Image (cartoon, rainbow, N blue to C red):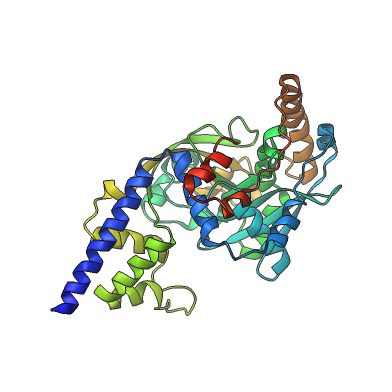
Amino acid sequence: MLLDTNKATKTASLVDAITNRLEFYKALSSREYTFAKKFEEIQANKNKYSQSDLDSVKAMIFNPEDPSDVMNIKPKLIYVDSTNKSGMKTFQILRTFCTAHENVNRIGRALRYLVIDEATNKYLGIIHVCSDMALLSKRNKYLGIDKQINARDWECLKNIASCYTLVPMQPFGFNYAGGKLITLLAGSEVIEQDWNRKYKEKLVGLSTTSLYGSFSQYTNLKHWKKTGELQSQVSYKLPDNEYELAKDWLNDIEPEKHFDFFERKHASGKGPYIRDNKNKFHQYVFKKLGFKKTDYECSHARGTFFCSLFNESPEFLQGNINYEKLTRRYDNSVESLTAMWKERYAKKRLEKLEQSGNLKSEILFYDGMLNAENWNKAKTLYLNW
């Protein structure tokens, strides 16, 4: 009887904690929620990197004293993975402290790159392409693969990649339309060839979604086509404190289920038994505690975009043409893409900002969130950058 009482008390306490957290999230705009999750992420990893590590990476972010120097940059993509510990560490620091979106690992294929300027060795941005998502209806219709996807025939997804992270360092992104360069480089021959070599599948296109609404760095970008808008249902994720409380609660209530989520391994011996276990754990706990979908989900509008590397990429994905018959849609060498970006985007953006006096000079690096007392303090530091 005492055990049942303890479980009931723990359940009630957890429901209260989650209710308060969900009410806080629901009161935020899409942009505010994104930054709130970034604050939680950085607070949870306070001791992961030393201040000297952060300072050394920050010192290497591209930010020329003479704005016109941007016309001399020579971008280079440096591939990083777990065998390159130094490069991966730098990538993760930039991914955590220079991007608004929470740093979450994706399941499946992944290629990660540091984009540097060869002339200065400074960081221009980061790129992370990975396995693509099936449920992008507007994109699927645009490519003519909606019937395949609806029939759960996902073979065509092996030949397209999702651009999960396309982030320019700031103020490079703001001052020079740097996000457009990083996006163009995602479709470069470097990434195409790396994908083909590593995964033994021919990459014929890339997709991505905007972070906020339909207007983004992908808007009016050459070689990238807007395929529609996505009203995605996003399930809130609990911060570490409530997350650990929920894990402990489930272990008391249903230890077998807890084992399936966090300890049991897939039959292959690689990865957890339940794919995407953290997201599914959240949804299971919310439902188990009696929360409705409207309590723990919100709708975010995002634009969807696609880059075809070949003129016949849609036909190839539909299975109507062989790879050998594909014709190159554009010159995707790094040199060609960079030259086009300089003339079409960077030069015009720089001229406009110089005329208005709105050039930014400060590097955007979220290390100030490490010592911010709370979300409100962090918000005043960065939300309106």
* In the image, residue 268 above or below residue 106: below
Foreground residue among 164 and 381: 381
Image position, residue 214 (x, y; %) = 49, 33
Q: Residue at x 43, y 73 (%)?
A: 272
Residue 62 position by quadrant: top right
**In the image, 182: left or right of 236?**
right
Q: Name, please, the residue furthest toward the top.
A: 355
Q: Measured from the top left, where is residue 233 in percent x and y? A: 37, 46
Q: Quadrant of the N terminus?
A: bottom left
Locate the C terminus by quadrant.
top right
Q: Can residue 80 be seen at all in this image of the molecule?
A: no
Left or right of 124 on screen, residue 156: left
Q: Residue at left 70%, top 43%?
A: 363
- Tell whether 226 sits left or right of 188: left
Find residue 279 and report its image quarter. Answer: bottom left
Is 190 situated above or below 345?
below
Left/right of residue 215 with respect to residue 20 in the rendered view: right
Question: Residue 226's x, y, as percent?
Answer: 53, 34
